[in-house]
Image: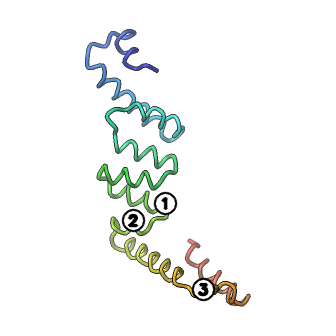
Amino acid sequence: MDVPFFLRRLTGYPGDIAGEARRLRVVAVEALIEDSPGAADRTLRKVVPEDTRLVARVREAQGRFDEAAEAFERAEMAEDALRAWRMAGRWEEAIRLADGTERADLRWLGELQLMVEKQPTDLGERLTAGERERLLRVVGRVTQG
């Protein structure tokens, strides 16, 4: 839809056409985010200048959490960036924004990752069935809520 044409020709809008067109596009993106992230993204491309907060929300709705987190950080929305980094499974990024118990949890995940990365070569081939079963139970305790 040609929003400036609609405002100028069909409604006779007397104000700032470009500013009002941008405002209406932002409203449209906000309305589309939850139910149609793809349509929200297509409309978002027409919002000039870019609204970083809106970019972040659309990327999050699309499940593009890395991009959402980066945009939330650019928009200085630390709590939202933290959530998006965690949704992306990027605890090494999230830890910078976390505190308290959440920060401790993220630090532990990082330490666990380092430990797994340091496992002896071909350990998986040498594990017995009993060791493998116990290891799965131990890891399962972490992932069960």
Q: Is residue 19 above or below residue 79?
A: above
| Image spot of residue 125 (x, y percent) | 69, 85
Q: Is residue 104 left or right of residue 132?
A: left
Give the residue at mark 1: 88
- Name the residue: 58% across, 79% down: 141
- Name the residue: 66% across, 84% down: 124
- Name the residue: 46% across, 49% down: 60
Evaluate if marks 2 and 1 touch, with contact meaning CB atoms under 8 Å apart: yes
As shown in the figure, which amino acid type bears the numbered disc 2?
Answer: Glu
Q: Is residue 22 above or below residue 92?
A: above
Give the residue at mark 2: 93
Q: Which is nearer the N-term, disc 3 or disc 2? A: 2
Mark seen at residue 121: 3
Q: Which is nearer the N-term, disc 1 or disc 3? A: 1
Label 3 residue SS? loop
Q: Which is nearer the N-term, disc 2 or disc 1? A: 1
Q: Quadrant of residue 24?
A: top left
Q: Nearer the viewer, residue 117 or 102?
A: 117
**Which residue extends farthest front?**
121
- Name the residue: 57% across, 73% down: 143
Label 1 residue SS? loop
Mark 3 nearby-residue class (10 Å; few <14, some 14–19, many ≥20):
few
Q: Quadrant of residue 18?
A: top left
